[in-house]
């Protein structure tokens, strides 16, 4: 009561957020009007994978009383099941924190970001709603490839960067070395680094203070017309589309009639709120704040990420949208059971709303029926998407071997009716145009960054050479660590480059890449035949000079994954009508039941049942049965251990 004469934002903030809600809520609706723009900070945590973003986020949530300290809060912001299982953040999540600093109450909006290279796109999206970032670096591992990539994303977006050195509790922590790296690489004085242990909570409070002191408030005004950037959206089975928004002007509340600048469709707002990290309705959201909005958007395509929402009667100049994500890896997806087509179609639609970086084209295969050709940001992205389909939507699908988008320049486009343009993009190898129609092929390339302890350089150079990579740069970032830059054909790294790099460097080398455009390539189409039948899903585009090796490896791999059957199976790789490699799977010698001597019926039944279950996971090509997961395992250059 002693503070009641003070304006609301000068009042000491209760540590328990439930008190806050009691104090500032009317009929269960929270009120965030007590935070003028100058008391708002919007920031993100960026880091290399596993350097501790999620753990730091948990501590920040606890210190600010957003979540209780009693329960075990392990990576509260990682909500998806795949994220908990794989221990990686896939989908960026947002949380509003309340914090009192030197007598003033602040509203801090924390936007969690994924660390893996495939999800770089989510990082830049999160950054567009922020004015600053915490750049977290592991005190033991030091700067890694993704640290560099993330630093530049933040730097180019002109955000304030607060370097945080995490895990100082580790025995091998060497904060000083990491500070030197930061000074060297990013030109940030080592005095600016904060040394913390997110696990133990050491110095984490200091991080909050720096967020307030070093990151500027958003430069916006409530007096301007409403301008809300949709920076993320999720689909809820019961409530429809929930859009995450950052307000660049004006205010928004229930009942407002709003319009999408993109589609010009209008909606009535039914709820606005903040994320703590669960949805908490508020009466109004004000310029500078970050929160969510529900406005009766039912179609998954309505809440386009990057769209600007405004008042129906007050159209505004839309904010610059996001660079749309560019898919780097394509694969065919088919229902494992054809009758499931419609269920899977709706699951794919819902998942792509949450993950708009996936592109979807309808496709069909002779054997697998109707399906889709999907574009992903990378192989992990593809696996995560597949896993989410299975876990969240109970959908069972067959994924074909991943490929990159090649281009072909047609020599006489006018003569080929199907292709109107001179240059076509091929996202499906089975549609690869014949060499006789093409004057040049082009393949996508990436500029890769590898950071490694110098003892592994020899092995890494050799690996890069086998991947047709061209060295662009090599610098020492401290006495023992080297940063290498290579230009790779994208195709050479999508499947297993990262695994190979990790295993030859005992896990110490890190890798990140960015798009580097197209380059001419000498390409050719290779078929895989099983007893003379071409397997559409295994058609591969290869560099001419590598055709023989790739064909041989694929045949050998297939031999390992195709079970013996009643007859001999010939596995062949062919270019046109020329066979370039062959392996043979010998037929069964014994009947599985021979061992049972006709006596034990229950044992016989068990064997037959096991066989029948095995069959379900097989699919027929001609007369040959192939396990469904064969496609990915065949394309890997190194078999799974
Ligand atoms: N010893 C120690 N371990 C930590 C600390 N902070 C995080 N860790 C551990 O490091 C691992 C990775 O932490 P996360 O918070 O999941 O890392 P992340 O950066 O969010 O990882 P991604 O979401 O995969 O990008 C976990 O096992 C944490 O328990 C710390 O301060 N000290």
Image (tube, grey):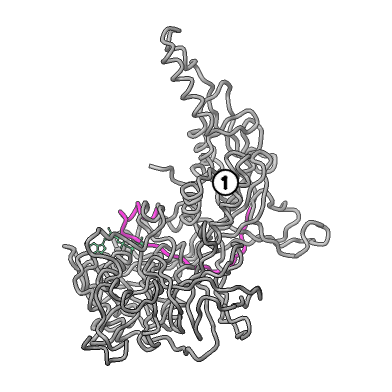
Could you classify mark 1 by the number of other residues whose Cα lies within 10 Å: few (under 14), some (14-19), or many (20 or more)? many
The answer to whether one can see residue 142 in this image is no
Boundaries of the magenta span: 500-523
The answer to whether one can see residue 71 in this image is yes
Residue tagged by mark 1?
400
Q: Is residue 197 left or right of residue 311?
A: left
Residue at figure coordinates x 36%, y 54% from the top left? 84
Q: Is residue 365 left or right of residue 595?
A: right
| Mark 1 lies within 8 Å of ligand 1 (Cβ measured) | no
Residue at figure coordinates x 43%, y 68% from the top left? 485
84 and 384: which one is in front?
84
Q: Position of residue 377 (x, y in %)?
A: 52, 61
| 411 magenta-colored | no
Check the image and report above or below for 107 versus 554. Answer: below
Check the image and report above or below for 483 versus 130. Answer: above
Q: Position of residue 269 (x, y in %)?
A: 55, 73
């Amino acid at each position: 009561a002693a503070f009641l004469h003070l304006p609301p934002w000068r009042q000491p903030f209760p540590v328990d957020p439930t008190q806050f809600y009691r104090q500032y809520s009317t009929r269960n609706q929270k009120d965030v009007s007590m935070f003028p723009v100058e008391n708002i900070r919007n920031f993100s945590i960026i880091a290399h994978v596993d350097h501790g973003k999620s753990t730091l986020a948990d501590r920040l949530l606890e210190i600010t009383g957003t979540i209780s300290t009693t329960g075990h809060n392990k990576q509260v912001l990682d909500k998806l099941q795949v994220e908990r299982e794989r221990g990686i953040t896939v989908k960026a999540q947002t949380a509003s924190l309340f914090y009192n600093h030197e007598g003033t109450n602040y509203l801090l909006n924390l936007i969690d970001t994924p660390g893996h290279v495939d999800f770089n796109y989510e990082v830049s999206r999160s950054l567009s709603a922020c004015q600053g970032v915490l750049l977290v670096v592991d005190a033991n591992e030091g700067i890694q490839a993704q640290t560099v990539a993330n630093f530049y994303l933040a730097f180019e977006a002109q955000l304030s960067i607060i370097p945080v050195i995490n895990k100082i509790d580790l025995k091998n922590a060497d904060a000083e070395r990491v500070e030197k790296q930061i000074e060297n690489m990013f030109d940030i004085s080592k005095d600016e680094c904060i040394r913390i242990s997110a696990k133990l909570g050491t110095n984490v409070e200091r991080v909050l203070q720096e967020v307030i002191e070093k990151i500027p408030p958003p430069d916006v005004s409530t007096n301007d017309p409403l301008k809300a950037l949709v920076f993320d959206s999720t689909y809820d089975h019961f409530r429809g589309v929930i859009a995450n928004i950052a307000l660049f002007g004006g205010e928004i509340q229930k009942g407002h009639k709003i319009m999408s600048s993109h589609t010009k469709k209008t909606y009535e707002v039914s709820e606005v709120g903040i994320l703590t990290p669960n949805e908490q309705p508020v009466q109004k959201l004000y310029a500078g704040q970050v929160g969510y909005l529900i406005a009766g958007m039912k179609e998954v395509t309505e809440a386009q990420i990057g769209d600007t929402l405004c008042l129906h009667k007050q159209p505004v100049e839309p904010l610059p949208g996001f660079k749309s994500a560019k898919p780097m890896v394509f694969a065919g997806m088919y229902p494992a059971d054809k009758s499931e087509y419609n269920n899977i179609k709706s699951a794919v639609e819902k998942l792509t709303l949450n993950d708009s970086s996936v592109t979807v084209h309808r496709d069909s295969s002779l054997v697998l029926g109707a399906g889709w050709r999907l574009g992903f940001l990378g192989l992990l992205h593809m696996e995560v998407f597949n896993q989410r389909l299975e876990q969240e939507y109970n959908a069972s699908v067959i994924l074909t071997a991943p490929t990159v988008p090649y281009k072909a320049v047609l020599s006489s486009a006018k003569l080929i009716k199907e292709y109107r343009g001179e240059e076509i993009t091929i996202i499906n190898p089975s549609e690869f145009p014949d060499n006789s129609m093409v004057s040049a092929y082009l393949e996508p390339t990436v500029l890769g960054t590898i950071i490694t302890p110098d003892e592994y350089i020899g092995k890494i150079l050799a690996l890069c050479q086998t991947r047709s990579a061209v060295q662009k740069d090599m610098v020492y970032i401290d006495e023992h660590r080297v940063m290498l830059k290579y230009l790779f054909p994208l195709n050479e790294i999508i499947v297993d480059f990262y695994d190979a790099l990790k295993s030859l460097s005992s896990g110490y080398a890190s890798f990140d890449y960015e798009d580097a455009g197209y380059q001419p390539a000498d390409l050719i189409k290779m078929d895989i035949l099983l007893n003379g039948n071409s397997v559409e899903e295994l058609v591969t585009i290869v560099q001419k000079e590598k055709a023989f090796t790739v064909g041989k490896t694929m045949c050998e791999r297939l031999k390992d994954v195709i079970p013996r059957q009643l007859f001999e199976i010939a596995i062949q790789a062919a270019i046109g009508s020329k066979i370039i490699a062959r392996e043979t799977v010998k037929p069964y010698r014994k009947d599985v039941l021979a061992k049972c001597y006709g006596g034990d019926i229950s044992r016989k039944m068990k064997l037959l049942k096991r066989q029948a279950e095995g069959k379900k996971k097989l699919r027929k090509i001609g007369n040959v049965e192939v396990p469904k997961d064969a496609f990915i395992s065949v394309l890997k250059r190194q078999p799974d251990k």
